[in-house]
Amino acid sequence: MSDIIHLLPDSIANQIAAGEVIQRPASVVKELVENSLDADAKRIHIIIKDAGKGMSATDARMAFERHATSKIKTADDLFALHTRGFRGEALASVAAIAHVELKTRRAEDEVGTFLKIAGSKVESQESISCAVGTTISVKNIFFNVPARRKFLKSNETERRNIFTEIERITLVNPNIEFTIIENDMQTLYLPPANLRQRIVQMQGKSINQQLIEVNEETTLAKIHGYISTPQFAKKGRANQFFFVNNRYIRHPFFHKAVMTAYEPLISATENPNYFIYFEVEPDTIDVNIHPTKTEIKFENERTLWQILMVTIKESLGKFNAIPSIDFDTADAPDIPIFDPSLSPSMPKVNINPNYNPFQTSGSNGFTASKPKLDWEQLYKGFENEKPDVDTSLFVPAHSHEKPLSAITSPEHYQYKQKYILTSVKSGLMIIDQHRAHVRILFDKYLSQITNRKGVSQRMLFPEMIELTSAEASSLSEILEDMEALGFELSDLGNNAFAIQGIPSELQNVDAVALIHSMIDKNMETGSNIQEQVHETLALSMANFTAIPVGKSLSEEEILLMVNQLFACQLPNHTPDGRAIITVVSDDEIDKKLK
């Protein structure tokens, strides 16, 4: 029997490695930019179409060999890493699944080198005249791995992923100049700046007013960066970044430390922005546990958790985010100075020994009487009081359908401005009013998007919304569907938009916050299927505009909501699966009262 184990050809081995390192076009951008930074580049141009120092001729050829690296020479170097890449797999992986062209020249050389590779195969290498530095062109990603190529998403989705990677890199390299050119048009230019300025460049001017500086240095780590004030915390997606030794990482454990510090200041559903940078000794972390190097193992993880949590709390306290007791006021109590020469006296309490709470009058002249409460006067007009609720939002889910007459009984009650109670044949029905309204509005908004029947109301004073590059890319994906709902937005350039109109049924709604929530939801789901995008958009709108918990409803409004709910095709659950209705049976009630 012949041997069955054999070595894989380098081209196939590189394609397997590419599956770990190169997942999408954004991965290529990340690897190329990080290699440029490791080469001490000060100006980086990223040119995107459809979604540094030079090298010698030998180095140019060697750079595309697997495990060829200039960054480590011995195993000990793995524990003293200061570079972003080190395994020598990036360029080899890129060249294995794309058409690559490289032009490079050192300052001391008169001519440069031009290298052309496709699918790990060197097609040509020649000397050319070119500028000092290196230019790498990568085209037709996964041209020879069709199974991987078909999993790539739309150009807009892949563009958004590219900008996500660019954002992570630029935030940790504020001193580097970046230029991004898309389809021959410059879409982003970042001049060298300090850290705060770079955050504002990437996130928009509005973030500047909410940043609180974080700065702490211990024997284990130096922690610095910025966090947002609690009042700017928002529901849904926030800008949250951890960097360790100039490398972006994900770290749920450290995220919990930040959220613990914010716990008394924001609700459990809100998220603050943070940009936190760790500087630690390289031998106390292991960056080689994941191909993309976004997960890091820390030697002193629990201790760093405590340091981070206390540091965030201290920063919040310094900027008066955490209330403190102030004794330095005019109304402060007068605390006497202790005098040892004076003997202390027992405290005295003045009482009336003749007071009898059960005696209406007495010889001592004291008269006690029960307070008279006019209950009828207290509740006069209560039944006629109308709560301030915008009934325009209570629109039938299907305009052609009449509300069901099956539920016409006026015996509906609102409990704690949260639940609607009504008796049914089998017991007591409990309806969550907020979730019921979410279901009603979701069906309505989804119908508007599908049928393109949303009506817009022009804003008297258009509002401006500033987005990050990734958010602007996400907006372009859903803009057509938003227009179907009734939104009108004008592109002002540089990722800023003017809100010219909103859906006509929306009143007293924060349009900027609403659009941010819709973009965030789209970025979280990352769906590429039109039907799912429609549902995500409709649900985001419904969650944002539904009546909140704690809103009083009149009897007419309660009846209208119940009728509209049961006109929906799926009244029992919200679109994201939360229960709307529950019934407590008569038997359960009887058991409770036995």
Image: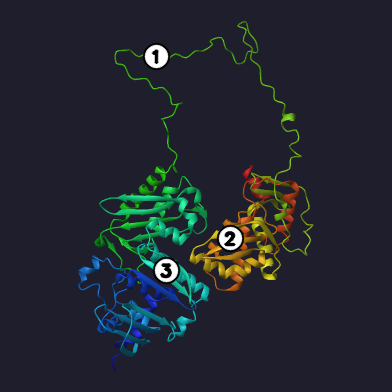
Residue 426 lies, in percent from the top left, at 71, 53
Give the amino acid at mark 1. Met
The amino acid type of the residue labelled 3 equals Glu
Marks 1 and 2 sit apart, C-alpha to C-alpha, by: 67 Å
Q: Residue 165 carries which label?
A: 3
Identify the element where label 2 is drawn.
Answer: helix
In this view of the protein, can residue 432 be seen by the observer?
Answer: no
Marker count (numbered)? 3
Element under label 3? helix
Q: Which corner quadrant of the image does residue 371 belong to?
A: top right
Instruction: Report the colour scheme.
Output: rainbow
Residue under the point 57% across and 56% down: 513
Q: Looking at the image, which residue is at 40% across and 73% down?
A: 45
**Amino acid tagged 2:** Ile
Q: Determine the CA span between mark 1 and mark 3.
A: 72 Å
Quarter of the picture containing the C terminus is top right
Query: Alpha-carbon neighbours of circle 2 within 10 Å: few (<14), some, or many (≥20)?
Result: some
For label 1, the residue is 346
The image quadrant that residue 502 belongs to is bottom right
- Residue mark closest to the camera, 1 vs 3: 3
Q: Element type at marker 1?
A: loop
Tell me which label, 2 or 3, sits earlier in the chain: 3
Relative to residue 573, is residue 223 drawn left or right?
left
Sequence-first tag of 1 and 2? 1
- Taking the view exactly as shown, the residue that stands out farthest to the bottom is 1
Q: In which quarter of the image is the N terminus?
A: bottom left
Closer to us: 298 or 139:
139
- Please state the horizontal and vertical placement of residue 420, each as a whole percent of the image: 68, 49
Decide if residue 449 is in sight here.
Answer: yes
Q: Residue at point 74% right, 56% down?
A: 563
Label 2 sits on residue: 515
